[in-house]
Image (cartoon, rainbow, N blue to C red):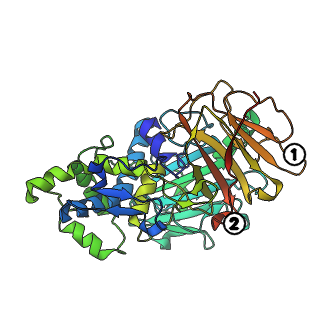
Amino acid sequence: MLQHLLRIALLGSAALSTAWCDEMPADSCSRYLTLDPKARDDKQIHIGGDGVSPETSTIMRAYAYYYPLYASYRALVVSSWVRRDSVGTVMNYDAPTIRSSVPRQSMAAVYSSVFLDQDKGPFRVTYPMVSPNETFLSVSILDLFTEQLLPTINSQFNSTELTGSFELYGGNNSMSLALESNATRFTCQTQYCWIAMRFFVSDRSPEELEKIKRWQNEIRVETIHDGQYETTQVTMPMLGEVGQAGESVESFFDLVNRLAESSPPQPELPILLDSFKRLGIGPGLKFDTSSLSPDVQKEIQNIPSCFEEVMLNTNLGVQSSSGWKYAIDAGQYGENYLERAYIAVNGLGATIPRDIIYASHDGLDAQYAYKMDFTADSIPETYAWSMQIYNQEGKIEKNPENIYDINSRSSALNRTEDGSVTILFQKNQPVDASAGINWMPTSGYQDGESFLPLIRFYSPGESILSREYQIPKITKYIANE
């Protein structure tokens, strides 16, 4: 999907969880926005500080509030650059392959994605009926503000409730057009709605990928028209050009003001939204900087670059005693627009915890070897877990061994008789080939460079959902290479 769509729209892909450094950026940016990883969840993000005008703080809040709308639309536009008919057409991805443009991409999932224009609906979307023992499939339905519509569709969690299709309403269409009285129905409050499906892959074997391809081919989008379902080509008019990340604050608000006319913000925060409107930020308004003082006009030019710099360089979440940090919850944000913005920067389209929970670890110096032991009594309660490592930018470094993922459902996973699993993070292949030893190569990193482990829990159990599960520690050891 080209570089930016791959960056922000592969969902899990990017695995939401995190930017990797806890260091704060330069003082110039921390004047506008600071993130405190040690604070409670709802107190981790702060806007404004000493020396920043009230107008600048309000504009920064508006930037954070509308950023998910902007980022989702960028993903939509870039998908249409790749395939001119892609809006309304399901885009299937064949296999997880390393892409240098994708931060924190998952090598244990294959994706399908489609954007739908609600003014052309309503729609029926058909998805494959994957049984719980075949694989993990989740279907995320998100509006342009990245709020996930519920109930979730998950082959593991509510498999007995799945019907193989759902109807999607919104815009000017009405549920009175429904054809099936027992259909699962969703209402999308923004003009465009984003549907993303994830298929878990354990081995990436040709046979497994061919099976997933057959499932992908079962995905259909139909319109509900004149009392019947119709398969039609849905095209979409573009509402505006989208520039590169970090474009001017004026062009940002010019676009989101137009987008918000057909995809308005929800009314949960009326006082905040009114403060935006007074500065010309909101549906159909004109953001005019000429009414601002010269100092404020100068200050706000730093907002786009500082916003992404701070959001990308702080790891928010729930810290555990073992050195791991669970990512903040995604998908359902309510009034917490700041965490919604954080997720949009670090993993746009990330799904709700019931589908996937992510946890990241502090950086580890690649000149040393490390081990992690899942003992028989510490095996996580989840459909599958997947371990990968990334560089400081969240990218995958290639290694000659072509090993990038260790997951609990892989046929290559080595276990002991009691089910224990050991992961060794080191440059050279371990001499120890005893039962339970699994190698994660760090040969793509120079001595002194850091690699960052990330673990995903697919359809996690209650102990992980509550963050009570203690992920095993990673400890330094002397490698016998």
Q: Where 413 sits versus 444, above or below? A: below
| Left or right: where 191 falls relative to 435 | left
Residue under the image location 86 percent in, 36 percent down: 434
In the image, residue 256 lies at what x, y percent?
29, 56
| Left or right: where 53 falls relative to 47 | left
In depth, the one of 319 and 14 nearer the eye is 319
SS for tag 2? helix
Task: Count every numbered label the image shows and give the total.
Answer: 2
Three-letter code for the amino acid on which mark 1 is drawn: Thr
Residue that sits furthest to the right in the current view = 417
Q: For the C terminus, which image quadrant?
A: top right
Q: Which mark is residue 416?
A: 1
Question: Which one is earlier in the sequence, the residue at label 1 or at label 2?
Answer: 1
In the image, residue 390 lies at what x, y percent?
56, 39
Picture quadrant of residue 13: top right
In the picture of the structure, the residue carrying the numbered disc 2 is: 463
In the image, residue 120 lies at what x, y percent?
42, 57
Q: Where 18 sits versus 466, above or below? A: above
SS for tag 1? loop
Q: Where 248 sits versus 430, above or below? A: below
Residue under the image location 55 percent in, 43 percent down: 363
Dot 1 alpha-carbon crowd within 10 angstroms: few under 14, some 14 to 19, many 20 or more:
some
How far apart are the alpha carbons under marks 1 and 2?
A: 24 Å
Three-letter code for the amino acid on which mark 2 is drawn: Ser
Tag 1–tag 2 contact (CB < 8 Å): no
